[in-house]
Amino acid sequence: MLDKPNDLSRYDPVWRASERYMRARKNDVHIPLSFAWAQKLLDEYPDADRDVCSLAILLHDIGWYSIDMQDIIEKGFSGPNMLQSDVRYLHESEGVRLGTQVLQDTGWPQDVIDQVCEIIDGHDTRPKPRHLNDRIVRDADKLWRFEVTGVAVACDWFKITPHGYADRLEQQKTQLETDAGIRMASETLAQTRLCLMLHVI
Ligand SMILES: [Fe+2]
Ligand SMILES: [Fe+2]
C-alpha cells in the first residue's frame, strides 16, 4: 500500500488483475466511469472508507463475465422482474467469487476483502443499503448513467431513445442514496440534456 491515501495508483494492480472480467456488458466503460464518481462522492463523505468503496465499485460487476451475454439481455435487462432475475443474483455471487480471488492475489487484507464482498453481494438486489460505504457504492454505480456516455450505452441496452431514457432518469435521480449523489445526478442530467439537444429532439 502507498502512503498517500488518495493515490489511486494503489488500485492499479486490481484493475490489471480484473481486466479480463470487465470485457462484458460494457463494464470496461461502466466501471472506470463509476469508479470516478465514487472518488467524487468519497471526497464529500470523509467518514466512508476509501479503500473499501473504491475496491467494491471496481469489482462489483465483474461477475457478469461468468454469464452468457444473451442471458444478460433477455433475463437481466428486461421484463417486470429484471432486478430480481436469477442472473442478477448470479452476477453478484460470481462477483464475490472472482473479486475475492482478485483481492487475495493483489495482497489486500482479509478484513478489507470481507467488507468489499459484503457490498458486492446484494449490490443490485438488496432492498436497502446497510451503511455509508454501501450507499456510496450504490450511488457511484448509478451516476454514470446520467452522463452522455451512460445514456448512449443504455439506449442500446434498453432499445430506447436518448430523450426517453433521460425522462426515465428524471425519476431515478430522486432514488439515489446520498444528498451529494442526488445533486450530482441532477446537474449531470441537465448537462446531458443540453449536449444531446433533448430540448429539441
Ligand atoms: Fe450489478
Ligand atoms: Fe454496475
Image: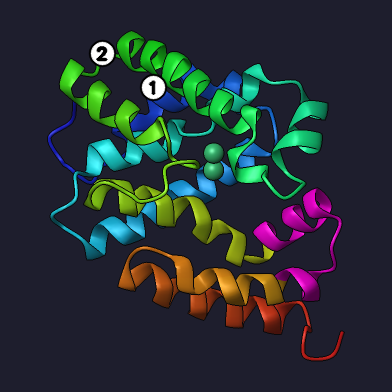
Quadrant containing ligand 2 reads top right
Circle 2 residue: 107
The numbered disc on residue 165 is none
Residue 73 colored magenta? no
Label 2 element class: loop
Relative depth, front residue between 102 and 80: 80
The answer to which of marks 2 and 1 sits earlier in the sequence is 1
Circle 1 residue: 13
Residue under the image location 62 percent in, 70 percent down? 169
- Taking the view exactly as shown, the residue that stands out farthest to the bottom is 199
For the magenta stretch, what is the residue range? 149-165
Quadrant for the N terminus, please: top left
**Rendering coords of residue 197 (x, y %):** 79, 84
Q: Looking at numbered disc 2 in the image, what kind of residue is underneath it?
A: Gly
**Rendering coords of residue 144 (x, y %):** 55, 57
Which of the 4 quarters of the picture holds residue 56? top left
Q: In the figure, is residue 176 to the left or right of 135?
A: right
